[in-house]
Amino acid sequence: MSSGEAAFIAALRGLVSHPAARGLADDCAVLEFGGETLIVTHDMMVEGVHWLPEQDPADVAWKLLATNLSDLAAKGAEPIGVLLGYTLTEDNARFAAGLGEALAHFAVPLLGGDTVRSPGAQTVGLTALGRATCKPVPSRSSARAGDSVWITGPVGAAMLGFEALSSGNPSADTSVYRRPVPRLAEGRALAPLVTAMMDVSDGLLLDASRLAEASGVTLALDPRAIPLPADLPNERARDALSWGDDYELLFTLPSGAVPPCRAHRIGTVLPRGDAPLLLGEAPPAGPLGFEHC
Ligand SMILES: Nc1ncnc2c1ncn2[C@@H]1O[C@H](COP(=O)(O)OP(=O)(O)O)[C@@H](O)[C@H]1O
Ligand SMILES: Cc1ncc(C[n+]2csc(CCOP(=O)(O)OP(=O)(O)O)c2C)c(N)n1
Ligand SMILES: [Mg+2]
């Protein structure tokens, strides 16, 4: 098997037959169970890969919970509870304090987990359980030609926050990078209306091309319509589309439908052409987003 995230997940797809797995091509598993529809997701974070070693562990805990809740938001789900996988360090108290703050903020109960010691970089993981609030549960695979493409907010603020933290700029607002806010209310409001929905974690261009591939369509994005942070330098506009860590919701609506929450129309769904994604007139050049390789 070739190395890298995409190749490994492709190999895992050969092991998957349960419909709840959605072919490992969605943000969450969608499990019919006891008359309910459970929404289940698990995301991990690693020191040096997902956060800087000098960051406050309280912010790491917040981000771990928020990024998992963002996957629930993309399915319009209401959180039920979470399980934590934790590697011990020198400062476990700050992590616990930050987790407590985030659990209270999002009103989500901690249900259990596991704790280990490890000789390597700290790794943390979280499983989030949710309940579907509408059926069908939105997927990445139901966008149709003629739909409009929308996003709930700007991309690129986390990149600026990361760069400010890395360069030790004390006056910059780094909160979007350190403490993202999952779009739970927006996801619930949008779920009955969207034709497809996902959250944007790996970069708008990569995640939009994944939605296009899952739906068998081409997404044509208008670069001038994509919302960017007010303080983004012009020359960083292309980087903002592919850096990632944005945690906004990307969704498609039938032509003419209006979203019930703040959102920006950024493009149109076309019948599938040669490429899954157009940025302006052509497929985007350069990196589309973040991948573990
Ligand atoms: N180690 C793994 N085992 C099983 N499924 C996995 C694994 N890694 C990723 N997946 C699945 O592959 C799909 C894509 O994963 P990913 O890109 O991480 O999604 P997301 O950005 O929503 O977290 C998801 O359905 C996820 O559940
Ligand atoms: C220290 C540090 N370096 C680089 C990044 C950039 N980065 C790392 S992972 C990632 C994307 C999200 O991570 P992933 O594990 O792919 O989450 P998933 O898509 O599975 O939710 C980004 C933008 C970062 N967040 N922190
Ligand atoms: Mg993931």
Image: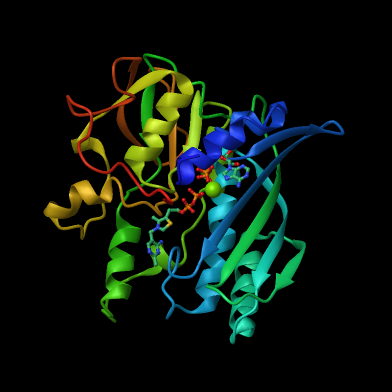
Residue sitting at x 52%, y 73%: 121
Q: Position of residue 187 (x, y in %)?
A: 54, 40
Q: Nearer the viewer, residue 42 or 247?
A: 42
| Left or right position of 253 against 156 | right
Residue 150's image quarter?
Answer: top left
Q: Where is residue 66 in the image (x, y as percent from the top left)?
A: 55, 58
The vertical placement of 28 against 275, above or below, is below
Q: Which of 116 and 260 is in front in this view?
A: 116
| Left or right position of 8 against 175 | right
Residue sitting at x 45%, y 41%: 2
| Left or right position of 223 against 52 | left
The vertical placement of 14 against 57, above or below, is above
Q: Position of residue 219 (x, y in %)?
A: 33, 25
Q: Nearer the viewer, residue 50 or 1?
A: 1
Residue sitting at x 47%, y 34%: 260
Q: Is residue 143 visible?
A: no
Q: How is the image coloured?
A: rainbow
Residue occupying the far front of the picture: 1
Q: Can residue 140 be seen in this view?
A: yes
The vertical placement of 98 against 139, above or below, is below
Residue occupying the far left of the picture: 235
| Left or right position of 290 against 187 | left
Residue 270's image quarter?
Answer: top left
Residue sitting at x 51%, y 29%: 140
Q: Where is residue 6 in the image (x, y as percent from the top left)?
A: 46, 40
Number of numbered discs present? 0
Residue occupying the far right of the picture: 34
Q: Which of 97 and 52 is in front in this view?
A: 52
